[in-house]
Image (spheres, coloured by chain):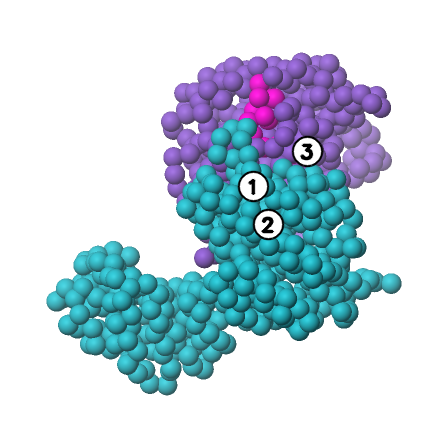
Chain colours: A purple, B cyan
Amino acid sequence: MNIHHLIRELREENDSKIVLLVADGLGGLPLEPGGKTELETARTPNLDACAREGVCGLSIPVLPGITPGSGPGHLGLFSYDPLEYRIGRGILEALGINFSVGARDVAVRGNFCTVNEAGLITDRRAGRPATERCVAMCRKLQQIKVPGVEVFVEPVREHRFVVVFRGDNLGDAVNDTDPQQTGHKPLEARGADSHSENTARAVNHFASEAARVLKGDVPTNMVTLRGFARYPKIDTMQEVYGLKPAALAVYPMYKGLARLVGMDVIDAGSTLNDQMDTLRKLWTQYNFFFMHYKYTDSTGEDGNFPAKVEMIERLDAEVPKIVALKPDVLIVTGDHSTPSKMRSHSWHPVPTLLRSPTCRPDAVTEFNESACLRGGLGQFQAMYLMSLAMAHAGRLGKYGA
Amino acid sequence: MNIHHLIRELREENDSKIVLLVADGLGGLPLEPGGKTELETARTPNLDACAREGVCGLSIPVLPGITPGSGPGHLGLFSYDPLEYRIGRGILEALGINFSVGARDVAVRGNFCTVNEAGLITDRRAGRPATERCVAMCRKLQQIKVPGVEVFVEPVREHRFVVVFRGDNLGDAVNDTDPQQTGHKPLEARGADSHSENTARAVNHFASEAARVLKGDVPTNMVTLRGFARYPKIDTMQEVYGLKPAALAVYPMYKGLARLVGMDVIDAGSTLNDQMDTLRKLWTQYNFFFMHYKYTDSTGEDGNFPAKVEMIERLDAEVPKIVALKPDVLIVTGDHSTPSKMRSHSWHPVPTLLRSPTCRPDAVTEFNESACLRGGLGQFQAMYLMSLAMAHAGRLGKYGA
């Protein structure tokens, strides 16, 4: 029995409201032995107050030692087991440019490459063209017709773009056409089952047409395709939790991930302040709010410790606006850690606080890694965050008599 | 591999004795921000001494955020995965009145209701009759004969009673006959498979006979039946753990739950003092003792914080009697939390102590929620309590060479 089945069985309706504030890549590391993490360094009086009134802990995004990408990181926070629900690269790439992928789609990431007259690849990234050229080349690819299948081509940046094949009975068990080294031709696509053979046929047609329309466009005169992925079949948060969820995110990727689990994706402007205004406006219309804050992750990925500290402090300054709305449950967490020291996502557990009138407060008085380690939520798998949220909101009945 | 398979493979015999003292609904919440829980408020010098000598932690009854009923709560403590072993309402109801249900039984909860001359229900609870009337009406129902099936009818209280159908090949995939609203006739029972059709036939026969024998007894002139449940197939604690277990409980429900997992249910009197006397008397005859204390839960459900504190202190006063018997392992825990503040069972983790010469003592010197949070057992799922008990009792061999 998985946690979703249990929640479907036990869930109850009421008027409670839940806010899930995700500071992307929140957790960090000290730069020096004996030093402090970004969150320990930041002045966060408002988050500290929430920690004092609430219960804290550390969230393990997937399993100990496993570093998640943004997809599994967020699915985990929405309590979709990230090992059960997998989102392929193509779909994530499409979500990342706000392409509205759907149930009949197979999405794939494309790369422009350079081939010589024999068709052998001489540069797998086509010399990293300017994004404008990427856009222009994609316009050419958009003219390609494939019998029986709709094809969409959208630029990402430099040599990268997205292709979406839309049709019936398209599988995604298709090999990458990128041979991963120069001196080889792009590989032919093959499907591992009959539905994937349908896709492979469309892909090979598309690739030969691409070779034709790009013929004169050295160095962007050919394409390779990687990471074929169907749109995953995911029950919505409404179906699983009985919630009416809204997503207030700024970046397309997170909007896409929210749409994937059935949230209403709201145009929330481009700043935290805009997001807070939107939250206030929508307060009566939804009962679950996912708010995404990107800059704790991007500064971490830049390896910019002081900038991450500053981004945390900016987030802290906005927290009272949420508290003023009196959510029944406020959760602040991250989808994973992004220590500036590592300049990348990491596996380290993520500081998490849950503030609710029904929580059992612990002795934690500050919101950071070392304080959360002593918190009442202990260390828990992210996939139990929503059952905790639902319980504290009074939305889960008793299991068994 | 589940924990039972592992224990069966590794278990060893010795002369050790294990006592599991369950204070029902033990965990609590502070009434006010910054306040103390019931257990933090109570003076518990004896439990504190056990905490000091032992190792503490917090037990998660089912999964984070999931509030268990008494059935799953206790199955969890006996380390039967409460998501795998499910006990239907009818069986729990029968256990609750000390009816000795067995493998050939389908039990169901009955309600007296009022029907008009057209047979339509006008009151689903028959005006909540006095329990004496319930007893008298059940006596009438006890006369009903159903071909090929033994039927037992026992009063619970007010409009509620239990019916047990005993026979071969009786399934429990049978719909409730309660239409859940007035203005309708009781529903006909239908079985979802051939064994359940056998049950449904018996049920419909019973219902039409009930209508006949109660005809003149307005307002208790008809019955509805809800929560058909077979006696679950559960391996005994003797089979799984190789233990000879005795249950010293006062309330029928907990006696029934203990019988379900194969414990010898002992008539242990009606007070804690009686239970302690019984424990002493039986000390040489068993090697596992489940002692159940109800009043920490009932006072919590009443929302009576000071009474719960007092019940905890009364329990504490009896603890030295157990310690004097020198059990190899003494565990004190609860099946779930019942915060007075919430007047109900809750999902909050339950303070747990394990005192044994083989335990690794931690720094915990008091037995309560906040102290247990710093304990050596950490937060753990209740279904691992018995493997911990068996290990500390020297009853589990090494896994693998």
Q: Which mark is residue B316?
A: 2
Instruction: Give the camera-side residue of B329 and A268.
Output: B329
**Viewer-side residue, A348 vs A159:** A348
Residue extending farthest bottom: B148
| Mark 2 neighbour class, 10 Å CA radius: few under 14, some 14 to 19, many 20 or more | some
Question: Which quarter of the picture shows residue A228?
Answer: top right
Rounded to the nearest whole Å, what is the CA distance between mark 3 and mark 1?
Answer: 23 Å
In the rendered view, would you say A177 is above or below A52?
below
- Disc 1 target residue: B42
Q: The N terminus of chain B is located in which quarter?
A: bottom right
**Looking at the image, which residue is at 42% across and 79% down?**
B166
Q: Nearer the viewer, mark 3 or mark 2?
A: 2
| Residue B339 versus residue A138 in the image, above or below | below
Q: Position of residue B260 (x, y in %)?
A: 54, 69
Give x and y (percent) for residue B65. Answer: 54, 44
What residue appears at the point 39 percent right and 74 percent down from the top-left corner? B164
Identify the residue at horizontal 63%, vertical 54% (top origin): B319
The image quarter containing residue B197 is bottom left
Which amino acid is tagged 1?
Ala
Mark 3 residue type: Arg
Q: Main secondary structure of the magenta part?
A: helix
Q: Disc 2 marks which amino acid?
A: Asp
